[in-house]
Each structure stands twice: as structure tokens, then as C-alpha cells.
Image (cartoon, helix red, strand yellow):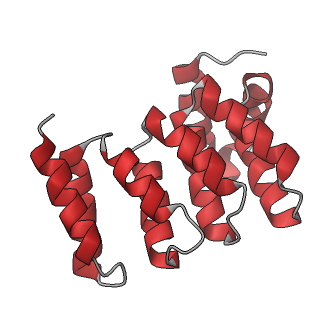
Amino acid sequence: MSAFPLDQFRAFLDHMDETERADQLHFFRLLDGTGSEVVGELAPRAFRVTASQGLRLLAAEASYYHPWPEWVSPLARFLRHETDPGIFATCVQALTRIGNGAALAALKELNGLRHEPAFQEILAEALAQSDPTEAFRYHLKHMLLGSSNPGAATDAVKVVIREGLTV
């Protein structure tokens, strides 16, 4: 990929107001046009203690909507210290969507590091969805909801079929 889209993305980040709706939309448009190269530029800016909550949230959402493997290492480092449960949950779901071995290892490591109840609950849910030894039971529980929650049941069936999950 040409450096031009990445240069545009860098220039935009330097002047972006993450609270402005127009800038948020432009951020995602540029992200779509840049590709996974953006992780190396965005992660060091957004996943640090001094970053604003708005920038951290935008980066978390970027990792969720674009589950590139390049996100795993920056997310794993960032989540060791993130204090906002909403941002934490979005990043954990991004790791779940990435779904490779490194992402699963990062989730397991975080489960051992983060002992706060809210974070433990988020991690337990993510591990239940993504750990091959737990995933079938997790989705079976949702399939059994049946007519009481047909959306969740249907989604669970789709995942079990797509992933070929078995007991």
C-alpha cells in the first residue's frame, strides 16, 4: 500500500478533535482506506496513559471493527492498565473477534492479571466465547434460549455451524 493514505491518517490524527462527530466519521473513513498499517501509528498514540478517553475509545472501536492480527500485542499491553470498563470491554471483544492463538493467549494472560470484578466478568464472557474448550458450552447455553430469545439462539447456531464447534 502507498504511504499516502497513512500520511493522510497521521496528519488527521495530529489535528483531530475526537469529540466532534464529523471528525469521528472522518477517522473511520480514513481507517477504512488505510488498512492494517494504521495500527503502528494509532496504537502508540491512543493506548497510553496520557491519551484522552475519546481517543482511547476511538482506537478501541477501530480494533473491534477492524479485527486485524496486528492489534493483539498493543491491545494486550494496553488492557493491563485500562481503567474504563467500557473501553476495556470493547478491546476484549476486539481480541475475541481477532480469534487467533495470540489473541486467546492475551485474554488468558489478562484473566490472570486483572482481578477487579467488573473486568473479571468481561474476561470470563470473552474466554467462554473464544476458548475452544469452552465455546461449545457457551453457545449451547444461548441456543437453548430458543423462543425466549430467538436472536441470541439464531446467532449461537450460526457460530456453532461456522466454527464447526463440537463437544
Give the side of residue 114 with respect to residue 154, left or right: right
Which of the pair 154/49 is nearer the observer? 49
Q: Is residue 128 above or below residue 64?
A: above
Q: Is residue 137 left or right of residue 46?
A: right
Q: Position of residue 10 (x, y in %)?
A: 24, 60
Q: Nearer the viewer, residue 103 or 14?
A: 14
How many numbered circles are shown?
A: 0
Among the 4 quarters of the image, the one containing residue 67: top left
Tell me residue 103's x, y (percent).
Answer: 62, 34
Q: Is residue 150 visible?
A: no
Seen at 27% across and 76% down, the residue is: 16
Q: Is residue 70 above or below residue 48?
A: above
Q: Nearer the viewer, residue 124 or 3?
A: 3
In this rendering, does residue 77 appear at all? yes
Q: Nearer the viewer, residue 162 or 81?
A: 81
Which residue sits at x=57%, y=21%?
A: 163
121 to the left or right of 39: right
Taking 89 as reference, is 49 above or below it?
Answer: below
Quadrant containing the N terminus is top left
Where is the C terminus found, in terms of image quarters? top right
Percent position of residue 73, x then y? 57, 40
Residue drawn at x 64%, y 49% as measured from the top left: 77
